[in-house]
Image (tube, rainbow, N blue to C red):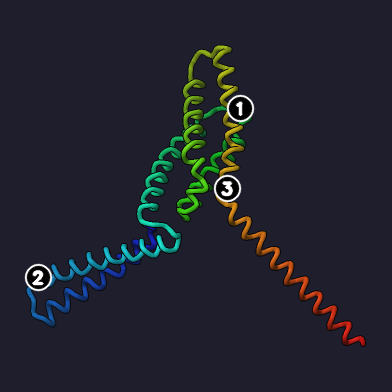
């Protein structure tokens, strides 16, 4: 909603209008330089603010959200962004080459869930388990693993704990993949519906051609 494009549009609308009002006030209505400037700045600020309100209302209407719902989702997404930063930093700090591919996939899926939810906030409700459970667990496990693996003296108990942490992170990867599947489940259903419609259309066209060919041969 606060994308660079929206910001640029509001600025590019407000500045020309502000300058136009200043020029008209100063030259056409013979106002003082400072007063004309005040009119121009006020008009620009009002235009920028009104543009933001219109963009927000359109965004909320497009995604079927109330202002309160969006504020709730945005607050949780902002918190999740900080957690993802911590998670990815910890994941990159883990020095265990055999699990590198698994960790890269884990980070890819978490980024995908976040980006989809950021782009379409209503998907947040399908990803609540990820944001309120799995993400927290992943951050805690990854950071704890980094801390324990950095200890200068390794013991058998410590090695067993690190192995168990890696296994738990591996299991958590599957849960996060399921979270992503839930987020895009409606898209999959819609795609399957479109495929069925397309198949039915193709069959009807084939049947129609066969029927026309039979009539022609008669």
Horizontally, residue 169 falls left or right of residue 75, namely right
Sequence-wise first label, 3 or 2: 2
Image location (x, y in percent) of residue 58: 39, 65
Task: Report how far apart the C-alphas of labels 3 and 2 lie in the structure.
Answer: 58 Å
Residue ID for mark 2: 35
Mark 3 or mark 1: which is in front? 3
Q: Residue 177 carries which label?
A: none
Mark 3 or mark 2: which is in front? 3
Horizontally, residue 203 falls left or right of residue 56, namely right
Tag 1's secondary structure?
helix
Image location (x, y in percent) of residue 5: 39, 62
Neighbour tally class for label 2: few under 14, some 14-19, many 20 plus, Cα within 10 Å? few
Quadrant of the image occupied by residue 169: top right
Sequence-wise first label, 1 or 2: 2
Location of the N terminus (image quadrant): bottom left
Residue ID for mark 1: 167
Tag 2's secondary structure?
helix
Location of the C terminus (image quadrant): bottom right
User: Quick check: 181 above or below 149?
Assistant: below
Residue that appears at 74% across and 67% down: 199
User: Quick check: 103 above or below 33?
Assistant: above
Task: Report how far apart the C-alphas of labels 1 and 2 lie in the structure.
Answer: 70 Å
Residue ID for mark 3: 182
Tag 3's secondary structure?
helix
């Amino acid at each position: 909603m606060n994308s660079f494009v929206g910001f640029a549009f509001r600025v590019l609308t407000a500045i020309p209008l502000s300058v136009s009002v200043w020029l008209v006030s100063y030259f056409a209505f013979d106002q003082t330089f400072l007063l004309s400037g005040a009119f121009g700045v006020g008009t620009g600020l009002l235009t920028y603010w009104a543009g933001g309100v219109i963009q927000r209302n359109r965004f909320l209407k497009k995604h079927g959200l109330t202002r309160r719902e969006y504020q709730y989702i945005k607050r949780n997404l902002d918190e999740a962004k900080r957690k993802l930063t911590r998670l990815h930093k910890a994941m990159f700090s883990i020095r265990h080459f055999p699990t590198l591919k698994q960790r890269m996939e884990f980070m890819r899926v978490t980024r995908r869930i976040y980006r989809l939810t950021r782009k379409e906030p209503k998907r947040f409700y399908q990803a609540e388990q990820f944001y309120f459970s799995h993400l927290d667990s992943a951050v805690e496990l990854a950071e704890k693993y980094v801390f324990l693996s950095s200890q200068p003296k390794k013991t058998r108990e410590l090695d067993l704990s690190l192995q168990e942490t890696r296994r738990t992170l591996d299991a958590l990867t599957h849960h996060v993949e399921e979270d992503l599947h839930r987020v895009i489940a409606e898209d999959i259903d819609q795609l399957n519906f479109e495929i069925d419609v397309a198949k039915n259309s193709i069959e009807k066209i084939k049947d129609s051609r066969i029927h026309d060919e039979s009539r022609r041969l008669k």
